[in-house]
Amino acid sequence: MQPGNNRLYQSLLLLCLVAQACTTIKLNVPDKFSANATQMHVKGLNGWMIKQQISFGKYQSSTVKRGWNTTTTRTDRNTQVTVEDRLLRLYGVNRQNLTSNQKDKFQYTLENGNKAIEIFAIEKKTAEQTVANYNLPILGSSSTVKNYQYTFSAVLLPLKGGKEAPWQMILTNVFDAKKDTARRIFDLPYVEENGFATNGSDSVTIHPVRVKEMAMKNGKQGKLPVQLLSGYELRMDGGVVAIIDHFDRNIWIYNDLDEDTQLLLAAMASALMLRRVHDEVE
Amino acid sequence: MRCIIITSILLMVLHAQAQQNHLTPYQMKGRMHPLSFNLQFGAYKTEGIRRTLGSLFAFGTPNLLNGISQVDGIPFYRKERLRAKDVFRFSLLHDKNDIASVETRAFMLKNETYTIWNPFDSSFMGANNTDILEARIMLHSDTTQVWQAVFNNLHGTKEEDTRGLLRKDSITIEVIMQPLLLRMKQGNNIQDLLATVELVYAFRYNNRYIAAVSVKEAERKFWMDEQLPSNWQHLLASAAVILTVRRNLYP
């Protein structure tokens, strides 16, 4: 995506988010799934974050222990000389190639009354960007992301007293401007996304859900100008077993699953909701 | 049928991503300020990094047209020709034993032309640039164990991937710059299972990742398959040092 487009796109997204905050919209969950699943509203994601605890349905977390959410920015190796770099140099515009590293980590325990899972999670985002400082005050400065790598990694340890294989959960977003296919204003940047969880024998795949159509709280349907990341689907053996609605902060879990699997899916969904690092192109 | 295909593809992706867990991470220390030249990681340490005097300078070809073909600082023609090189050598120690001596020669020939009539011509995009790094890695001071290394487009000035090769006789190890999912720490604790995607120079042999080294200088790490023969480990560690120690030759 070109730098100019990027700014316009961000402004539109901001407008959409403001609209979202005012009207309270939620993800359209298919009737076929919602008829066989339980919807749980997640409490504790907003407000006082010291000694944060979340709860939804029969699930209750311990206090979420968080590390420092740090961001460091420095000049680093330039991995790619872009058209923008060349033009800025040609016209003598002051520019810098900066690499920023953002990290966050947290851990907590989620229980359903009978059993519990301990969750250790870390988020990391490394982004390389060109920052141009123009001499004209009206232009100020601009930045263009060349590439970024975002990872959310978590280990989920079922606590049952016996030996239980830990689950490893990974969600990655990788953006490379060289591979980007977005050319028009409303085109989304091309980001390689992968998500999965495995304990060595079983696996759950994580799929981002991007939609244009939303359901309002009053039941009416709304349409957004661009597709927004509105949640995630968790799938086992190709079938959807849980849905995470980021807009209305709901978790849907399929009913026809054993207690251990439901707890595992609840732990994954809650960990995804507790993330703080922004994982989209800025 | 569609479900089976999707599940198979997903399992392939899972396999490809989980595959890199066999690489053990090592933090690379040193070279964080101008007086700290040597690198240290795992049992490896560099010694005697020496650069030639010519590596500190770049030479350009003056072009009269560059000065006169502009109006109010806005150029309508500009040709930039620049030669820069980086020639250095070092020894690599493993548990204080000298295990490799490395000689490296990198050169950058910049030949970029801008014209207002054809601003995005390939010659402006670096198609005429030459960006090569060559190295000779001799293990255990044994002349029968000499590996040749070559890397292309390390400065990313061309519209092509950054790639390289390590070769001896018929054995070839591929190197490619790419993001890779790798473990953050070594150890057997539960939290050591955490992994992140890192932008690395990945070393592949027979389509299997055998080592990787960070591209970025912040929080540099080196990952290696510890099951490899010791000679291969020394070779990969030497190549990782080359890619870390090299200077930027593109202004």
Image (spheres, rainbow, N blue to C red):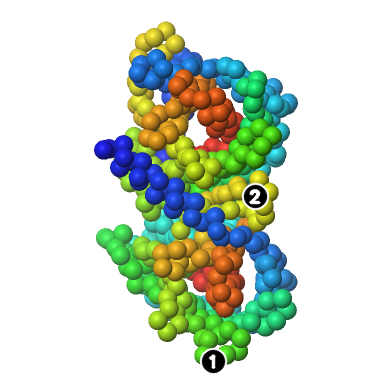
Q: Residue A136, percent across and down?
A: 50, 46
Which label was assigned to residue B192?
A: 2
Secondary structure under the numbered disc 1 in the rendered image: loop
Residue A200 vs B99, above or below: the answer is above
Point out the image quarter for the N terminus of chain A. top left
Q: Residue A207, percent across and down?
A: 42, 35
Residue A152 visible in the current orientation:
no
Q: Which of A90 and B245 is in front in this view?
A: B245
Residue ranking furthest to the front: A162
Picture quadrant where residue A76 is located = bottom right
Left or right: residue B159 compared with residue A59: left
Decide which of tag 1 and tag 2 comes sooner along the chain: 1
Residue A211 visible in the current orientation:
yes
Residue at screen point 27% across, 61% down: B118
Q: What residue type is labelled 1?
A: Thr
Determine the chain carrying the residue at label 2: B
The residue identified by callout 1 is B143
Q: Are marks 1 and 2 in contact (CB under 8 Å)?
A: no
Residue ranking furthest to the top: A218
Picture quadrant where residue A26 is located = top left
Label 2: how many residues lie within 10 Å, few (<14), some (14-19) or many (20+)? few
Determine the chain carrying the residue at label 1: B
Residue A217 vs B211, above or below: the answer is above
Secondary structure under the numbered disc 2 in the rendered image: helix
Q: Residue A122, percent across and down?
A: 61, 42
Left or right: residue A49 compared with residue B107: right
Q: Which amino acid does label 2 sit on?
A: Asp
Q: Nearer the viewer, residue B78 or B223?
A: B223
